[in-house]
Amino acid sequence: MFRAAVDIQPACLGLYCGRTVLSVNGSVETYGDCGVCPRGQRTDDNKICRECLGSPDRYDWLYLGFMAMLPLVLHWFFIEWYSGKKSSSALLQHVTALLECSVAALVTLLLSDPAGSLHIRSCPVKKLSDWYTMLYNPSPDYITTVHCTHEAVYPLYTIVFIYYAFCLVLMMLLRPLLVKKIACGLGRSDRFKSIYAALYFFPILTVLQAVGGGLLYYAFPYIILVLSLVTLAVYMSASEVEFFKDLLVRKKRLVVLFSHWLLHAYGIISISKLDKLEQDLPLLALVPAPALFYLMTAKYTEPSRILSEGGNGH
């Protein structure tokens, strides 16, 4: 009897349209009209809206970690860029930026469903189109559009926006007061430039998540590896690091090197997902390889040496 009641209902069109469960009487469920699923639900194989009761898997957490790292890394970059060589305030600003992002992440997790817990419930990501449900609203008669846009990847899409909002609020509350008190070595117009930079990159990150969230979800491990390799090579070249002893001259260079190694390791873990520890963990031994390769070959690619050898050949 239950199957017959389901079969006579008109078909629910659209990839992400579903019927909400109005009531449950024993094993019999009563469904509403075909439409958008409420927040925190997504359609199952039978086009029924079901509540998201799962938990993010390891790859989902790695993705959220990547999105959480982006503003922190940009904060550190612009603080270092604008702090000046003689400024002693950079370290405190770095620590403050870390504190802001950490508190923002903690508050975001505590406010997510279930509230008050670091555990969050989520829907599984099945394919790329799950991130772009607004592109799959059906038009049965080619005139009227049935709007079924909802967060099929709940909460991986919206939780990033909430985190960025808290980061911005905490930065505006803490950083100006700190910079005003400790950044005495900078000019009046220079001391707040790292904050002004954040007011630019936060909207950019928000648009990036809104438009390319799904693409970033699948591509972020490779983005981490490529960008960390390129930035490490650029930094070591700009710092004229050719031998290992050059790294020991300044502690800052070692900090930058170890930071890049952590990013390398994060990218490798994200790609492998550590599904098979005995196979994946040895890959972490490749983390220092790019830096060692650079140090071994830098002396052979010195422009002055190449020019001198070319002149001797003539």
Image (cartoon, helix red, strand yellow):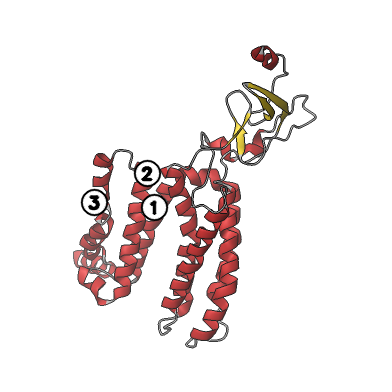
Whether tag 1 and tag 2 are in contact, CB under 8 A, the answer is: no
Q: Which of the 4 quarters of the picture holds residue 247? A: bottom left
298 with respect to 103 (left or right): left
| Mark 3 or mark 1, whichever is nearer to me | 3
236 with respect to 77 (left or right): left
Nearer the observer, 304 or 136: 136
Q: How far apart are marks 1 and 2 (CA)?
A: 13 Å
Whether tag 3 and tag 1 are in contact, CB under 8 A, the answer is: no
Q: Label 1 crowding class (10 Å Cα cut-off): few <14, some 14-19, many 20+?
A: some
The residue that disc 1 covers is 226
Q: Earlier in the sequence, mark 1 or mark 2?
A: 1
17 with respect to 280 (left or right): right
The residue that disc 3 covers is 285
The residue that disc 2 covers is 271
Q: How far apart are marks 3 and 1 (CA)?
A: 17 Å
Q: Is residue 127 above or below residue 67?
A: above
Q: Quadrant of the C terminus?
A: bottom left
Position of residue 73 measured from the top left corner of the image (x, y, whole percent): 45, 63
Q: Which of the 4 quarters of the picture holds residue 94? A: bottom left
Whether residue 205 can be seen here: no
Q: Which of the 4 quarters of the picture holds residue 11? A: top right
Kind of residue at badge 2: Ile
Q: Label 3 crowding class (10 Å Cα cut-off): few <14, some 14-19, many 20+?
A: few
- Asked which secondary structure carries label 3, the reply is helix
